[in-house]
Image (cartoon, rainbow, N blue to C red):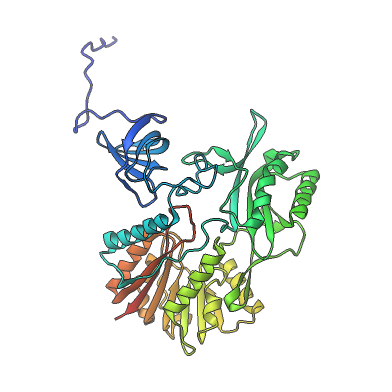
Amino acid sequence: MSKKKNSSSLRFQPAGGERAAQVPVGKKQRLAIERLAGDGRGIAFHEGRTWFVSGALAGESVEARVLNARGKVVEARLERLLQASAERREAPCRHFQQCGGCNLQHVPHGDQLALKQRTLAEQLQRVAGIQPDSWAEPLAGPEFGYRRRARVAVRWDAKARQLHVGFRAEASQDIIAIEECPVLVQPLQPIMRHLPTLLRSLSKPQALGHVELFSGSAEAVLVRHVAALPDEDLQRLQAFCLEAGAQLWLHGDGEPAPFIAGATLGFTLAPWQLQLAWRPGDFVQVNTPVNTAMIEQALAWLAPQADERVLDLFCGLGNFALPLARQAREVVAIEGVQVMVERAAANARDNDVHNAAFFQADLTQPLAGAQWAAEGFSAVLLDPPRDGAYEVVQHIAQLEAKRLVYVSCNPATLARDAQVLVNQGYRLTRAGILDMFPQTAHVEAMALFEAG
C-alpha cells in the first residue's frame, strides 16, 4: 500500500535553525571594502558573510561578482569601481582584469612591500607570539621585467577546433589569451608575443600539454606533449626557436631533453664568479636580481668564517651552498632528491669548488644521527619548500649551531617553525621580506636566529 503524501510540507531543519541560501556564482553585489587581506584581496562584510574581493582596495566602494561561495565566506572579483581609493594606480598590464597572475598591479609598489611586511609580522605574532629584535629593509628589485621562467597554458578545444594559449584566469580553468606579459624578462617578450601563432599553426595541436619559457645563460622553449609530435611540427618548432635565438626542449615520456643533443642551460651568480647548470624541471629562483641580493644578505647575516663548518639544508642546485663555500672552511649541503644532489655536486666540480659536499637525506627525519652531522656545525642555512621544515627544526639544536638563517616562501610555516626554534633556545634577532614576485601577494622572507 502506498503512503499518502504529507500535505503539511513539514521540513526538518538543522539544530541551528534554517540554513541560509548560498550566494550564487556570478551574482553582483555592492560592497564597502574595509581592509586588505594578506593575499591582497579587499575584505568586506555583508549580511553576515565575509567577502574577499580581488582587485579592490581598502576604503573603496565596489560592485563585485561572485566567483565562489562556501558557508560564510564569499570569494569575488571587482566588477565595477564605484568610489576609488586615492592609493589606487592604473594597472600597467592591459590583461590585468582577466589574467589570474599578477593580482596587485593596481597597488603602488611601496604599498605592496608594506602589505607583505605586515603579513609576515602578523603571522609571526599570531602563530608564534614573537617579533624580531630588528626588521630588515625589504629586498626588492625591478617591478617589471624580472621573471625568467613562465609556464604558458595550452588547451585544445575539440568542439570549436581551436587552440587556446595564454595564462589561467583567476579562480578558473579558462585560458586568457595573452599577447604580452610585462613581468617577463626582455628576452622572453618576443617569444611570448609570437608563440600563440606558432602553436596554432601546428598540424597536431591536440598533442600539446603546456609550454614553458626560460631565460638564463640561454633562452629556451620547453614543449610538453602528451602524444608524439609529427616531424613537420618538430621542424616548425625548431625553426621558430632558431629565429628567436632559443633552444627547443621537448618533454614527452621521461625527462625533458633538448631537441639538439648537448644543449645546456644555466645561470650566473656573478658576485661569486659561479655558473650553475640546470635543466627544465629543476627548481630555480625566477628573479635574478633579488636572488643575488638574497644570497648576499644570507651570507651577511650568517657571517660564515674561514674556519667554520656550515650546513645548507634543501640545497637544490647549490644556489646558497656554492657562495657559502667561498667563505667557509667546509659546507655540507643536503637535498631530498638524489638527482638534484648529483647536479649540485656537478655544479661544484664545474666551478672548481672542492670544500662543499652534497648528500641525499630524508629531510622529514632527525639529522643528528647522520654521519655528516657528527662534527656539528657553526651555522645552518635552510631554504625549504612551502611546507616548511617542521621535522628538521624539531631537533636542530643538537647540531650545536650558533646561527641559523631560514629562507621562507610561506610566512605561515616560517612562523610555525620559528616557534619550535625559539622553544629550543634560539632568539629571532632579525627578519625581513624578499620581493621575489612583484605585482603578486606572494611573500618570501628571511629570518636570522641566534642561540642564547
Q: Is residue 201 left or right of residue 446?
A: right
Q: Quadrant of the C terminus?
A: bottom left
Query: Which residue corresponds to the image point at 46% horizontal and 74% vertical from the top-left?
Result: 297
* Vertical order, 364 against 22 (above or below): below
Q: Quadrant of the N terminus?
A: top left
Q: Is residue 86 left or right of residue 246?
A: left
Q: Residue 153 in the image: x percent, y percent?
A: 59, 44
Query: Which residue corresponds to the image point at 66% horizontal and 77% vertical from the top-left?
Result: 350
Q: Can residue 370 be spotted in the picture?
A: no
* Vertical order, 22 against 33 (above or below): above
Q: Is residue 241 left or right of residue 321?
A: right
Q: Can residue 196 be spotted in the picture?
A: yes
The foreground one among 48 and 33 is 33
Q: Residue 135 in the image: x percent, y percent?
A: 34, 69
Residue at the outermost bottom position: 307
Query: Which residue corresponds to the image point at 51% horizontal and 81% vertical from the top-left?
Result: 331
Residue at the outermost front position: 86
Query: Which residue corresponds to the image point at 67% horizontal and 30% vertical from the top-left?
Result: 161
* Vertical order, 293 against 111 (above or below): below
Q: Residue 314 in the image: x percent, y percent?
A: 49, 69
Q: Residue 138 in the image: x percent, y percent?
A: 42, 65
Q: Quadrant of residue 134?
A: bottom left
User: How many labels were placed on the picture?
Assistant: 0
